[in-house]
Amino acid sequence: PMVGTTLGYISKVKMQVGRQLGQVPGFLEGRWYSDLRTKVTKRYVSKCKEEGTVIRKHAKVMTAEDLAIMANQLFKRNTRSSVTDRALLVLLWHVLGRVNEVASLTVGNISFSSTDRCTSMDVLVTRSKTNQQDVVRVFLHAESWVVCPLHALGTMLVLMDNPGTCLFPS
């Protein structure tokens, strides 16, 4: 089991609750959060010891082949949800982002630039750990449309019923 997945989920829930409640004194920086993370980690370690399961700190590295297999399977499902998932996955890969960084992208975060030699999509990403904004230049994929970020995003946008400013509405 991946302890990090659960801890990441808890972190996301904390941030969503914090956004909904607004500035509640002590909520986001309270001790309760670190206590909860400690208890969850201890529970995972205990359960793994009972079951004889090996604990891994990090998932295996995803390869370009893994991306192609997952993107292809999502495209083959041919649903709006799977097309959106493919676009999110492919953009995550190309901008080297965290899910929340890419999932929160808006139309205003995307621009296009062109030279005599190529066209690119410039993605303004706000890095969640540093709150720094980076412009990541993304290009057409030279070998496969399945993992091409421009194709994935374009396909998703064409299939949206009511496109708004948020690229990946929840």
Image (spheres, rainbow, N blue to C red):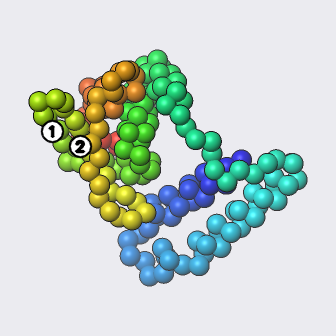
Circles 1 and 2: CB atoms closer than 8 Å: yes
- Mark drawn on residue 113: 1
| Res. 146 in view | yes
Q: At 11% from the left edge and 30% from the top edge, which residue is drawn?
A: 116
Q: Quadrant of residue 146?
A: top left
Above or below 39: residue 7: above
Earlier along the polypeptide chain: callout 1 or callout 2?
1
Above or below 61: residue 119: above
Numbered disc 1: secondary structure = strand
Q: Percent position (x, y) of residue 105?
A: 31, 48
Q: Amino acid at mark 2?
A: Asp
Locate the C terminus by quadrant: top left
Q: Residues within 10 Å of mark 2 (few under 14, many from 20)?
A: some
Q: Amino acid at mark 1?
A: Ser
Q: Percent position (x, y) of residue 89?
A: 44, 36
Relative side of 159 to 6, left or right: left
Above or below 126: residue 162: above
Q: Percent position (x, y) of residue 85?
A: 43, 33
| Res. 160 in view | no
Q: CA distance from mark 1 to mark 2?
A: 7 Å
Front position in the image: 110 or 155: 110
Q: Residues within 10 Å of mark 1 (few under 14, many from 20)?
A: few
Front position in the image: 77 or 119: 119
Q: At 16% from the left edge and 29% from the top edge, which residue is drawn?
A: 117
Q: Percent position (x, y) of residue 24?
A: 43, 77
Relative side of 158 to 148, left or right: left
Q: Quadrant of residue 164?
A: top left
Numbered disc 2: secondary structure = strand
Q: At 53% from the left edge and 61% from the top edge, which residue is drawn?
A: 11
- Mark drawn on residue 122: 2
